[in-house]
Amino acid sequence: MTIQRTVLLSLAAVLAPAATTPTANAQCHRHRPIAVRPIHHGHHDHGHHRPSSRYVAHRPHLDHHYLQTAQLPPAPRTVAYGSFSHVDDLAARLEVLMNELCLDLYYNYSHNPGFHETYAEAYSLFQTTRYIHASEHNYDRNAIRQQLGGADTLFHHIQDDVRGWSRIARRQIGTLGILTKMEMAEDTLHHLMEDVGVVATPGLEEPPQPSALSALSVPPPPIRIP
């Protein structure tokens, strides 16, 4: 009887630590929501970084709210001229970017000179992207081509206006700066024009830089005969 009691007491001593594990340790391993946010790298543009394609997961606290960039359709790796193979994705992507661009202009750049004209141009381009997206669903390829004609010229004009503007932070739109939004929108617009078979509007030819003159075979000056 004494031997059995000794064995039982020994087993109880071994099992006691496992049975009395603090509940606080178990709560530390409970599942918490994870928000996926982009890692920012690269240059600054009006107070924001341009993000890379990598993403990192952060565990938000209950009292913090993270601004999320609008979900964009993936950009295609390759686009064949006139193939109409990525119109829906590209049009949807451009529509989202132009929507954020117009909101950013409206809330944070209205104090700049010439704002009303530039905003009107940006909004008209936003309306064009919505029309193109709807036309793709109706399989109206001719309408898409007509709407895209000269769109890049208008976009580049907006770019030139905004590039020298200052920003007064009133409302954060997404997690990207306005110059990054415009670069992404420009790339998407060019891919869309390529996909539907619209040739980009040629720009003015710029003269070469002086540093490039050394590579040219410049003829010697004429010899004056006395």
Image (cartoon, rainbow, N blue to C red):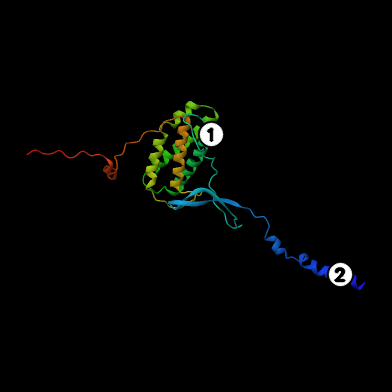
Q: How far across and down, in percent of the image, does residue 170 sit?
A: 47, 52
Residue 173 seen in render: no
Residue 155 seen in render: yes
Residue 48 circle label: none
* Picture layout, residue 50 above or below residue 217: below
In depth, the one of 25 and 54 nearer the eye is 54
In the picture, residue 3 is in which quadrant? bottom right
Q: How far across and down, in percent of the image, does residue 41 sit?
A: 48, 52
Type of the residue with mark 2: Val
Query: Residue at coordinates 83% horizontally, 68% vertically from top-left?
Result: 11
Q: Which residue is mark 2?
A: 7
Q: Which residue is mark 1?
A: 88
* Picture layout, residue 188 above or below residue 111: above
Q: How far across and down, in percent of the image, does residue 47 sit?
A: 44, 53
Total numbered circles: 2
- Give the residue furthest to the bottom: 2
> Element type at marker 2?
helix
- Give the residue furthest to the left: 226
